[in-house]
Each structure stands twice: as C-alpha cells, then as structure tokens.
Image (spheres, rainbow, N blue to C red):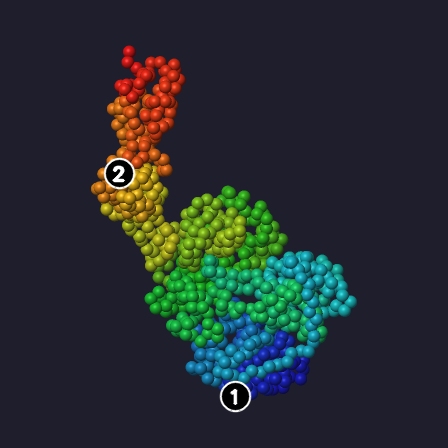
Amino acid sequence: MIPRSSMIPLPIDPSLPAIVEALRVHRAVVVVAPPGAGKSTRVPPALLVSGLLATEHPAVVLLQPRRVAARATAARIADEQGWTLGRQVGFQVRFERRVTAKTRLRVQTEGVLLRQLLSDPLLNGVGAVVLDEFHERSLQTDLALALLSEIRRDVRPDLLLVVMSATLETGPVSAALGGCPVVGVEGPAYPVAVTYRPSLRPASPEAIVPEVQRSLDADDGQGHILVFLPGMAEIRRNQRALEPIAAERGAVVLPLHGSLPAAEQDRALRPSELRKVILATNVAETSLTIDGVTEVIDSGLARLASYDAPRGIDRLVLSKVSRASADQRAGRAGRTGPGRCVRLWSEREHRARPEFEVPEVQRVDLSGPVLALRAWGIQDLAAFGWFEPPAASRLEEADRLLTLLGALDPRDRRITPVGRRMLDLPVHPRLARLLLAATDSRRTSEGAALVALLAEKEILLEAPAERSPFSSRHNALASGPCDLLPRLDLLAEAEASRFAPAVLRARGIDPVAARRVTRLRDELQRLVSLGTGNLPHPLGDDDQEAPLRWLLLAYPDRVARRRGAEGTAVMVGGRGVRLHPSSRVRDREFFVALDPREERRQGKLELHVRLASAIHPEWLEEEFPEALHREVGPVFDPVRSRVVGRTRLWYHDLLLREDQSGQVEAAEASRLLAEALRDQAVALFHDDSAAVSWLARYEFVRSSLPELGWPELGEPEFQQLLPRLCEGCREVAQVRQAAKVPLLEDLLAPAQRRELNQSAPAALRIPSGRLVNLIYEPGRPPVLAARIQELFGWKETPRVARGRVPILLHLLAPNHRPAQITSDLASFWATTYHQVRKELRGRYPKHDWPENPQAAQPRSNRRAPS
C-alpha cells in the first residue's frame, strides 16, 4: 500500500507492504518500530485497504492501553487520512464513544474490547485487531492477546492479529502467535543528546524550574519542552512555579495526564504558535504525538499500578522508570529533528536501573480479569494460555475475593448472576458490588456517588489540618458512622457552585477531582439505568444505614475491631490498623477500613486508615453466615487466672464476641489448669514455704549422703506432679494453696522418706522440751536457734546426716539476738560461756546464769527461779 501523497512520509511507510504480506500468509505479525515511526496511525488504515478482510468482518480494532492515547490516535488518523472523526475512524473508551455502525476503524482501550468479547466471543464484524504499545505489558493487553489467540485458534481462523511495540523481545510474542514473522522498522535518524544532572528531588520545582528556565532562555530554543513527572500533584506544583516564568518569555505551561478533561488534553497535544512547556505523566511516553518537541526534561519517576494486598486493591506506587521507558521518553525529543534530553539522575544510576518495567500481570490486582475469565468459561486458570502466567497464589487471592463478593459460587468457582451483573460495570469488582447493592435498594444515585468517590482521586485538597473540612478541631464537635458520607455533602456543594475553583478551594475541595467524581457518578447511573436485574432480599428504601451495608458488601475482607486507645484496631487477617485523626468513626467498635495504606511510624510499618465505615457485627451474621465459625469449650483465662467455659464467635479470623460464663467439668478444669501452668511448675513449688523447707532438707541430705542414690528433683519432676496438684482446682489461687509436700514425698521410696526424716529432721526437741525447727540453707549445715537457758543440760552439739554433720547453733541472748554461733557446744560451755555470762548477767539480772550450765536445769521461761 502506498500512503496518500498529501501525507507526511513516515519511516513505517516502506514496511507496510511487508506487514500486509505477512498477514496474508500467516494471519499474524509482530511489528517493532521506535516512537515516531508512524506505526499507530499508518498500519490500521493499511489493513482496511489490504484486501485481507472478509466482507462479513470488515472492521479493524486498534487497541491502546490509555484513554488519552486512544482519543488522540483516532484524531490523528482522521487528520492524516482526511476522514471525519466518528465516521470512518472513531474511538471508544470508558464513558466516551465516537463511533457509528459504519465506522470501520475503531480505536479503543483493551478494557472495552474485553467487555465486547464477553458479549460477543466471535467478534462478529471485526476482521483484524492491532495491539499497540505491547511493550508496556499492561494486564489488559496480556489478557487480550491470550483471548484473541484462543478465538483465532478455535473459532475465527480468519482473524488477523498484529502486535506492535517500540521496544520488545520479539521471540515470546512471535511464539505466542504460532511463530509468526517479525517486521522491524528503522526509526527517525535524528539524534537526541542526553545529559545527566542528578537531583535529590527530581520531581520538585527546585529541580524542574531551573532546567525549564535554562531551555526557555537558550539561544537556539524554539521547540516545545516536554517534562515528565510522576503524577498530578507534582504537575500542579510545578505548573504554579513555572507559569509566571513562562509568561515572561511568551510561553505557556500545559498539563497532560489521564484525569484531565478531553478539551484540556487536546490543548496540550494540538499545534500551538506559542512555545509550550508540557508537564506530563507517562501517558506521553508512547502513542501520543506531540509535534515540535525538541527537549525532554525527565524526572525519571512514574506512579505505577501495584497490588496492595492490605487494601485488596491496586494502588499507585512512586517508582523509578526502567531504562526502556527512559529511552522512550528521550525519543520524544527526536521525532522531527535533533533534540536534547536532560535526565535528573546520574548515569551510574541509569545503568543500575532495570531494563524493562515489571509486567502488570505480576504486580496488579487480578480480580477483574479473573472474573472475566470465569465468565468466559475458564475453569482452570493456571492452564489458561497466559502470555506470562501470574503466580498461582495471586489467582487464588482473586478467586477468594470474588467469592466473598458473591461473584463466584464457593463450591465450583463458577460465575454467579451477581458476578455477571458486575461485569457490566467498568469499575473494580468491589465497587461494582457496592453499586449493585445500592441499585437493588433503589438508591442508585447515592451508590454511584460512593463508588465514584472511592474510584477517583480524593476530592479534599491537601491542606493544613485547621483548614480541612474534616480537621481534628471540627471532628471534636462531630463524629459519625462513616467518613465517606460527609463527602457526599461536599460533592453537592461543588455541584451547587458549578465547580467554581475559588469557592471550592477555599472550602478545601479540589474542583477538578470533584468534577471527575460527578462525571463518573453520572456515567455509572446511566449504565445502571440500562437494566441490571435485581438481587434477592433488597434493602429497604428508608434504611438510613443501607450505605454502610453496601460498603461492607464491597469490603468484606476489611472488617476491623477497635482495640485499645489512639484509634487502633485489628483487621481480618491479623494486621493492626490505626485510624487517622481526621476520621469521624472514633467511637464504633467495628468498622470497615476502606483505604488502609502502609505508613512508617517510629520505624515500624503500620496500616493507616483515613476512610472508615462503621458496621454492626450482626450484619456479618446476616450477610456472610458462611464466614462465621463458633468455638465452644473450656479454656484457661490468663486475666482471671482460672478455667472458664468459653463461647467465641469468629468472622474469618476476627473475634466478634466472647462469653466466659459456661460450666466446666471438674476433671477437664483440672487438666486445662495443669496445661496452662506447665511453664510455672517450678515457681509454684518454690513459692510455697512448706515445699521450700522440704526441698532444702532434701538437697541437704542428698548432698550429705550421696551414696544412697537420691533422685534428681527438677522441672520435669515438678511438671509431672502438676496434674495431681491441680486435682479439684479451677483457678490458680487454689493451686497455690494446695498442699505440696505430700506430693514431693511421693517422689521418694519409703526407705528414702524414712532416711530423710531421720537424717534431715524438720525439727529437734531441745532440753527445755520445746520442738525447734531446723533451718536448712544450700551449702551450710542446718541451723538451730534457741535461748541459752533452753539448752542447759546439753553437753554436746547434736548431729544429723547419720552423725556426719553437726548442727550450727545460734545461742540467743534474752533479747533473741545471737550471743554466740557455734557448732561445738561443749567448747562453748567450757570457755566462751563464762565471758558471755559476765556480759549478759548485768544486763539481764532476772535471767538464770548458772556457774555450771551443763548440770543446770533448762528453762523455757525467760525468768530465773526466785
């Protein structure tokens, strides 16, 4: 095919005949061409006039991974071919459609194609599908390739497939298409000079503004400047900083990202007499043609979708772009002539970056695609012809969530009527479930608004706490059951003001985000109004808590129960969460965490929740009875230190309620008490004074008479005694009071018990007739303490341990303080006694101090005879 003579020649043009011939022979082809080669705008029209399309399938579908690119590419094709947008060529993206029944070339996103496949698996009327920008490896692109390959293999062998990319490892793609040919296209020969200027904050105005100013002031600076930034927040900050600088130099600053209204996107893309500084996200990396760009300033950052397991939904993660993405960005400056690219990182860091991005199939939530595959009839997800199969655990996670949402039958994982209704809605399955519940409550508008608030960017501006509509000061006066419902009021304010920026910003509301939310709300309402059937047991119209139930149905795996102070809670799955101070759900025990996200607090990662919605635990019993399980039985309660009869109700692994008033049989109580106290066995015996005394005697006789083979008494032996010690007991206090010495004695043989009592007696009777306890301490002889007068008549020190060990006598004065310590009583009477007698007789004259104590009568009373 020869392009129209009025078209600007592009590098792809000479290769178009080879692409058409490859399709004629193999019905599939892989095209590799760099940015600016013209593959997106020239290949699809070439297929229309190739003669390869059957009469009954005359249309060509061009798939683009982004809505901005789909709209812009369709407009570019119409301009090049002299066609009317919406007639010969059109586009279809979420909530926007410019096609008619006669449109033969449709540019659309993969999500639109996937919903089309579900309603028309044969793709009637479509003769060729072109998958553009395959190197981006979006999840929807991977899924589309797999499904289209299956259709071509099983029912539509005539279907033409073209996979196009700027940078791609062609072998796996060619193999996936049956070993089809690969057509390579050389790109423009214009060089791009790359400069590295490392910055610690490459997306900040401090890094971007000097580079833009330098380019605007350069002598040869005539072309437009394209600045790559990671997100809308960075674009807004740099736009505010750059606008006065650009205005002074006759330039204009324009944002470009997927959230902009179509008119503002077109303003950044269309030709301009003024020099443009375009602040763009990675939507401008490929597909989009921005004529006249001669310089690229690249922050090297992007926000990439990644599955956030704690939240159970995709989130955007700030990431460093790969080397391939950086080269794509630089190539934007060399499309029409030599260009420059400034990278705000070092050349060494560039070499360390990965060559390609991780494919989305390995990093994003799979519940939406899995629902589509289940609707397609795929039973074995692992055996499906994935271009690159995800981990089995990820597929199981998606199945589990969809089952919780009611989209899949828990028995065989087949799609349910609810699941099929969810497929009709172009939102995450969670949000589709919410909207269906609202619809069946006959409150679609309210449900659609809640879905839009959850699906789109936060409508509150990032502002100091005192200026926020939900500041802590404001919350001190008002709490409520849900953080999302007050945002409905703010949305109504925004609509009433007709989204006046000054008015809304003063109220802390983002006018752009609010407008996007209302647009999504209205589109969802329109879709639902086309008819979605009814769920059984719809909620009543007048149920004021119905929205809270809808949110529970959408987030059944995010139920949390408050614990302790400072707004902390534990969520299903065991993760701890912390409510943000701005949350109004401060006094509710159970709530759904709508947006838990990881944040670092004092060196620890915590899940912080800004949006919560209160629930009643009874709702879980009503909505998810299969997720509940009850535990009934006796347990040891460490708080009350006793065995109790307990009943627990669990929702998954989250405890809903507990009762500890049940009866427990005595034998079972004793057994559980013994198990609970097993690690405390030693302490229980060592904290008992009688047991301590007995053990001291035992250790004494064991060390004094080792030849008798005394058994070891340690932790195992104490644990062995626990069941008997706990007999008849239900609480720890009873165990502490129970007699332990009889149990210890039972560890010994009868002969050993007799020997213990003889060789290590607990007490001795002294001459006064009183029975005095002996004190046993490790490494010392037993101690007997008595007043001197009570020992008159004892000539020798008594001995124990078969006479091997003399007792250590503490001879007490009348004030019960030791006057002498000795193990040789005979020597004391003969020598030391007389000196003691001399010292004490004057102080205690009424006490008996005989000259010959060995012959004197012992006295138990303290006074001498009159």
Q: In which quarter of the image is residue 248?
A: bottom right
Q: In this view, does 348 lie to the left or right of 396?
A: right
Residue located at (52% from left, 69% from top): 359
687 up-or-down from 526: above or below: above
Give the camera-side residue of 823 and 655. 823
User: Picture coordinates of residue 841 (x, y %)?
Assistant: 37, 15
* Count of numbered badges drawn on the protein: 2
Near mark 1 (Cα within 10 A), the count class, few <14, some 14-19 or many ≥20, is few
The alpha-carbon separation of the residues under discs 1 and 2 comes to 104 Å
- For disc 2, the marked residue is 756
529 up-or-down from 172: above or below: above
User: Picture coordinates of residue 529 (x, y %)?
Assistant: 45, 65
Near mark 2 (Cα within 10 A), the count class, few <14, some 14-19 or many ≥20, is many
- Does the rendering let one see residue 393? yes
Q: Quadrant of residue 4?
A: bottom right
Q: In this view, does 12 lie to the left or right of 597?
A: right
User: Picture coordinates of residue 323 (x, y %)?
Assistant: 61, 69
Q: Which amino acid, mark 1?
A: Val
- For disc 1, the marked residue is 25
Camera-side mark, 1 or 2:
2
Residue located at (48% from left, 49% from top): 579
User: Picture coordinates of residue 827 (x, y %)?
Assistant: 34, 25
